[in-house]
Structure formats: C-alpha cells, structure tokens
C-alpha cells in the first residue's frame, strides 16, 4: 500500500481528504502484519477493550456513521448500537485481514460524501460537511496514536 504525504498546494477540501487518506493508511500499516493474538491483545491494564483490532473496528464504525450516514445520508445500519459502544468489541472471526478489508470497504462507501461541498449541510441537518470531515480526521489521528503504542507493545515496531 502506498502512503504519500498530502499535496503542498491542494485546496482545502482536497487537502482534508488527502490527510484523512494518509491517516487511514497509517492505521492499516499499524495493524498489518500482526497476528490475531497480537492484534487482539489488550496490554494496557486500565483499558481492557483497547486492542489494535478494536481500534480498527471502531474506526470502521466512525467512518460508517460520520461520513456515510450523518454526512452523505446513506441508508446503512449504524455499528454503534448499544451502550457501552460495541464497536470496540471483537468477534471470534475478527482478524487483522478481515478488519483491514472492512475498513477499506468503508472508505469506498464514504466516497459518497465527496458529492457534497464543504459548506453544504450534511445529511444529519446539523453540521457542515467541513465539520464532519474535520471531526473524522481528528478522531482517526487520535486513534492512530493509540495504534502506535499498541504496535510497539505487540512486536516492538515503531515509526510510520
């Protein structure tokens, strides 16, 4: 997978999408190559649901809700039904490969949001597309930080 820095002279919307794409690919790189046991491990005692697979599964739910449902108005089921947030919970068949694939599929579905301009009201009627895109980028960046730590604890690998 090729991951490149965003263009230096892109307009605001293109730049926002490019940074999100960079962060998405970084998240995938942090999980790719881990065994299921490594990726399902919760090495931080105070955060027993914080696993590399859980982070990736949560990012699938983030994209589904914010970009696809709230942003583009697609008729898709939310992956956040329940309390506490079930998007962090692992199923027996969740693997690095299956969740990377699910995440990439969500990226493709989220392309529907590109049909709207940044100042357009999102499908939820409450926010602009610009707000939603910024929110998803900051959420993804925060969780990439978690993945940095989880990857290092899993196998010692650091860096981008």
Image (tube, rainbow, N blue to C red):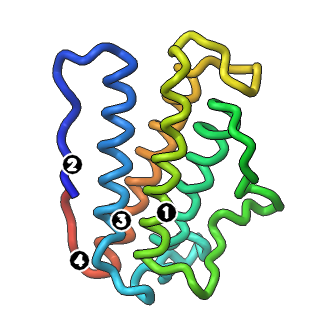
Q: Give the Cα separation between the discs numbered 4 and 3.
A: 9 Å
Q: Is residue 146 above or below residue 4?
A: below
Circle 1 is placed at which residue position? 56
33 vs 20, left or right, is left
Between label 2 and label 4, give the one nearer the viewer.
2
Residue at 62% across, 54% down: 61
Front-most of residues 138 and 60: 60
Q: Between tags 4 and 1, which lies in front?
A: 1
Identity of the residue furthest to the right in this view: 82
Residue at image coords 75%, 20%: 126
Residue 81 is situated, as x and y percent measured from the top left of the image, at: 80, 58
Lower sequence index among marks 4 and 3: 3
Compute the Cα span from label 2 to label 1.
Answer: 18 Å
Is residue 76 left or right of 109 when viewed as pictured? right
Q: Label 2 to label 3, Cα distance in Å?
A: 20 Å
Among all residues in the image, which is located at the extreme top? 119
Mark toward the start of the polypeptide (2 vs 4): 2
- When asked about the image quadrant of residue 70, the answer is top right
Residues 157 and 89: in front is 89
Label 3 near label 4: C-beta < 8 Å? no
Q: Indicate which label's residue lies in the foreground, 1 or 3.
A: 1
As helix, strand or loop, the secondary structure at mark 1 comes to helix
- Quadrant containing the N terminus is bottom left
Does 89 sit above or below residue 143? below
**Which residue is the site of mark 4?**
156
- What is the secondary structure assignment of the residue under circle 4? loop
Of tags 2 and 1, the one toward the viewer is 2
Give residue 9's position: percent from left, percent from top. 18, 16
Q: Earlier in the sequence, mark 4 or mark 1?
A: 1
Q: Which residue is mark 2?
A: 3
Question: Which residue position is annotated with label 3?
Answer: 149
In the displayed structure image, the side of residue 11 where residue 97 appears, left or right:
right
């Amino acid at each position: 997978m090729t991951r490149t820095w965003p263009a230096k002279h892109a307009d605001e919307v293109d730049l926002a999408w490019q940074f999100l794409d960079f962060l998405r690919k970084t998240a995938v790189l942090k999980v790719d190559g881990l065994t299921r046991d490594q990726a399902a491990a919760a090495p931080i005692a105070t955060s027993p649901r914080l696993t590399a697979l859980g982070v990736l599964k949560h990012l699938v739910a983030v994209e589904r809700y914010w970009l696809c449902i709230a942003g583009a108005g697609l008729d898709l089921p939310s992956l956040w039904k329940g309390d506490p947030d079930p998007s962090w919970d692992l199923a027996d068949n969740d693997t690095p490969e299956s969740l990377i694939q699910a995440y990439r599929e969500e990226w493709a579905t989220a392309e529907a949001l590109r049909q709207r301009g940044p100042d357009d009201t999102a499908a939820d009627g409450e926010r602009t597309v610009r707000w939603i895109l910024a929110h998803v980028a900051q959420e993804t960046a925060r969780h990439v930080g978690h993945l940095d730590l989880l990857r290092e604890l899993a196998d010692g690998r650091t860096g981008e």
